[in-house]
């Protein structure tokens, strides 16, 4: 007995539950009973536990094996040999029964049986209590009990009852009866043991942190009163009972399939790593996040599709690929009761993505391109990759990709420098007309004004699509009006990191910054082990298109999981404004195998190798060998055996 009752009771009375936000413990059947304090103390100490359905059933009868077990746990008895013929050594409670027998607390009949399943009566419970007093070397003066129903009892029973009554362990009923042959109940057993120990209870067993739970439409999570030692046991109980959730220390850690979503919420920091393996060893990419207790919301907290989870990882889906997250970085939110979630809509033929901000329950939207053919105006669709769309019930509605989001950056735009400048001038003027302070005098000061010639020069000399570079500049610098643009001639967020967004690289001119993007980032600087975003086989290369968090520049370039979609959306907006000269000029596809060789001609020499699958390609000509736009600037085209390319459907293209 290591823990004083005063401490236990203080915790029980002051902190009966430690709920997290919007959580409550299921109302139990102990509340309000006469012996509530004693029973709760015994439960808290791990001497008595509840049933699978979360109840404790204080009025249930107690069997002989149960009371022996309660005493063995309470006294922390050492193990003993098997002595009873009717107690199987393999029985769940056999170790406790044998320990109590070895301590002299229980005895069997003359036939060598213990009768473990028989209900224990009050007089026999008093006898076991008396034996426990002897084991504890506690002496008590015998005072003859004055109960009216003691006649006919053996002297042994009378002495045991008298001692326990004198010590205040056992009491009778208001009508001055003891009811010695009445069945003992669970609350009585708990009270007798509690008084036997005078509140000096054993150290509680290690906390069982796992519980099953349910959630209602209002988002209230109700946890079962029964706890489990491991995630596996709790998950098994959840499946058996039909519950919806598993919690650990009050936090949701498991949901049913298609039961909710995941938000990136680390303890600290502005990003969360996504791993390709459940052991969380290989981080492929990262996503934007806000810490759990952030005082200021700076970034978008990424929403991901929930796949499954354990207490060791959370499996999610985003951008076309499954990933794994650390449980501490993940907030699991069931659909039922969720205040909001991201969605897509067909708005006048455009695909508009509304991103949900979980911290302040708001939405922000952007134009991602052309609405897929199956989308109906006024309806909401849900997607975690921007090409597979589901209804609210989780059923697939259709799949279509955005052309510019997957168009390789090594292609060439059909627009001239003058046409690009004309669009820039018009777009900047429209921003200024909004009246926002950040766009004040933008038509005179914007750093993207007049960059058309520089963009086309980079396209011509370095083989980087001028339209894509312009779209990146618009997105990253807010039409050339950001502080980085004004102060550093930095249009692309170069060396601007999530943990220190105020700083970034400075350039003498805007054109210098454009060339730096093409040389140092896209092709890769000499001596930079990370290589280029567009150079196949380099560390940063996951495909030469804007892409997603699965493939493309977006994998390593930006924590925003929708960066590629936003850049593609700007490309679509510019193309639509200038006459649709670029949309649909190429057939697009993905490679479908790893270590794929691209050759100089059909059956020709090696040009380069795609180490990864699902690399986006722009197709120039189809046949047994498919001619594609080369991803290296020293060659215009390459050849891939056609079996290794899958053409995908594009929104807006028949």
Image (cartoon, rainbow, N blue to C red):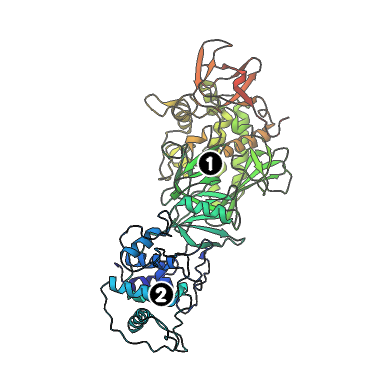
Q: Position of residue 370 (x, y in %)?
A: 68, 38
Q: Position of residue 79 (x, y in %)?
A: 32, 59
85 or 434: nearer the eye? 85
Judge left or right: residue 102 versus residue 619: left
352 or 445: nearer the eye? 352
Q: Which residue is found at the position 56% from the left and 59% from the top?
A: 214
Asked which quadrant contains residue 145, the reply is bottom left
Which residue is the extreme one toward the top? 604
Inspect this view and state whether residue 6 appears.
no
654 or 645: nearer the eye? 645
Q: Which residue is found at the position 45% from the left and 85% from the top?
A: 173
Q: Position of residue 605 (x, y in %)?
A: 52, 10
Asked which quadrant contains residue 479, the reply is top right
Which circle, 1 or 2, is nearer the viewer?
A: 2
For label 1, the SS is: loop
582 or 441: nearer the eye? 582
The tag earlier along the polypeptide, 1 or 2, is 2
- Any mark on residue 561, and which? 1
User: Vertically, is 511 above or below 325?
Assistant: above
Inspect this view and state whether residue 415 appears.
yes
For label 2, the SS is: helix
Asked which quadrant contains residue 563, the reply is top right
Query: Label 1 neighbourhood size at 10 Å, few (<14), some (14-19), many (20+)?
Result: many
The residue that label 2 is drawn on is 124
Which residue is the extreme one toward the front? 111
Q: Position of residue 84 (x, y in %)?
A: 39, 61
Spatial CA span between label 1 and label 2: 69 Å
């Amino acid at each position: 007995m290591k823990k004083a009752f005063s401490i236990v009771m203080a915790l029980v009375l002051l902190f009966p539950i430690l709920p997290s936000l919007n959580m409550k413990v299921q109302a139990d059947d102990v509340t309000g009973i006469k012996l509530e304090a004693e029973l709760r103390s015994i439960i808290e100490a791990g001497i008595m536990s509840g049933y699978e359905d979360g109840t404790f059933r204080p009025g249930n009868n107690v069997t002989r094996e149960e009371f022996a077990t309660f005493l063995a746990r309470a006294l922390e008895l050492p193990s003993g040999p098997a002595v009873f013929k009717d107690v199987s050594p393999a029985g769940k409670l056999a170790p406790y029964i044998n320990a109590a027998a070895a301590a002299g607390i229980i005895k069997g009949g003359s036939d060598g049986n213990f009768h473990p399943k028989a209900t224990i009566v009050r007089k026999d419970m008093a006898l076991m209590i008396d034996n426990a007093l002897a084991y504890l070397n506690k002496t008590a003066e015998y005072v003859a009990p004055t109960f009216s129903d003691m006649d006919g009892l053996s002297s042994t029973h009378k002495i045991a009852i008298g001692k326990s009554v004198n010590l205040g362990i056992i009491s009778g009923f208001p009508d001055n009866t003891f009811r010695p042959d009445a069945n003992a109940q669970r609350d009585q057993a708990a009270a007798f043991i509690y008084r036997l120990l005078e509140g000096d209870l054993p150290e509680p067993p290690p906390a069982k942190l796992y519980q099953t739970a349910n959630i209602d439409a209002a988002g209230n999570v109700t946890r079962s009163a029964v706890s489990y030692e491991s995630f596996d046991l709790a998950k098994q109980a959840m499946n058996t009972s039909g519950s919806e959730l598993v919690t650990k220390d009050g936090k949701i850690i498991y949901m049913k399939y298609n039961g909710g979503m995941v938000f990136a919420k680390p303890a600290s920091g502005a990003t969360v790593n996504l791993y390709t393996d459940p052991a969380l060893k290989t981080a492929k990419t990262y996503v934007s996040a806000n810490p759990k207790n952030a005082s200021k919301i700076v970034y978008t907290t990424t929403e991901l599709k929930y796949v499954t989870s354990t207490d060791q990882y959370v499996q999610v889906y985003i951008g076309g690929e499954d990933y794994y997250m650390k449980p501490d970085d993940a907030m699991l939110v069931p659909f039922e009761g969720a205040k909001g979630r991201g969605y897509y809509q067909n708005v006048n033929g455009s695909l508009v993505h509304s991103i949900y901000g979980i911290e302040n329950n708001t939405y922000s939207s952007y134009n991602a391109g052309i609405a897929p053919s199956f989308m109906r105006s006024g309806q909401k669709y849900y997607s975690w990759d921007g090409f597979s769309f589901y209804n609210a019930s989780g059923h697939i509605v259709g799949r279509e990709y955005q052309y510019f989001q997957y168009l390789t950056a090594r292609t060439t735009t059909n627009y001239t420098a003058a046409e690009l400048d004309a669009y820039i001038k018009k777009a900047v003027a429209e921003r200024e007309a909004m009246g926002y302070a950040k766009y004040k005098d933008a038509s005179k000061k914007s750093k993207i004004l007049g960059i058309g010639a520089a963009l086309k020069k980079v396209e011509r000399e370095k083989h980087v699509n001028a339209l894509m570079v312009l779209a990146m500049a618009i997105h990253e610098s807010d039409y050339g009006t950001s502080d980085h643009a004004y102060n550093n001639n930095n249009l692309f967020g170069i060396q601007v990191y999530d943990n220190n967004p105020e700083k970034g690289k400075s350039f003498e001119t805007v054109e210098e910054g454009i060339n730096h993007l093409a040389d140092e980032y896209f092709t890769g600087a000499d001596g930079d082990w990370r290589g280029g975003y567009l150079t196949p086989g380099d560390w940063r290369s996951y495909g030469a298109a804007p892409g997603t968090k699965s493939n493309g520049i977006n994998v390593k370039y930006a924590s925003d999981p929708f960066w590629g979609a936003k850049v593609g959306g700007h490309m679509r907006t510019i193309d639509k404004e200038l006459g649709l000269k670029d949309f649909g000029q190429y057939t697009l596809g993905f490679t479908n195998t790893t270590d794929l060789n691209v050759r100089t001609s059909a059956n020709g020499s090696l040009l380069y190798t795609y180490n990864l699958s699902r690399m986006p390609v722009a197709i120039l000509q189809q046949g047994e060998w498919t001619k594609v736009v080369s991803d290296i600037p020293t060659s215009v085209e390459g050849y891939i055996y056609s079996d290794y390319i899958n053409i995908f459907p594009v929104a807006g293209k028949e």
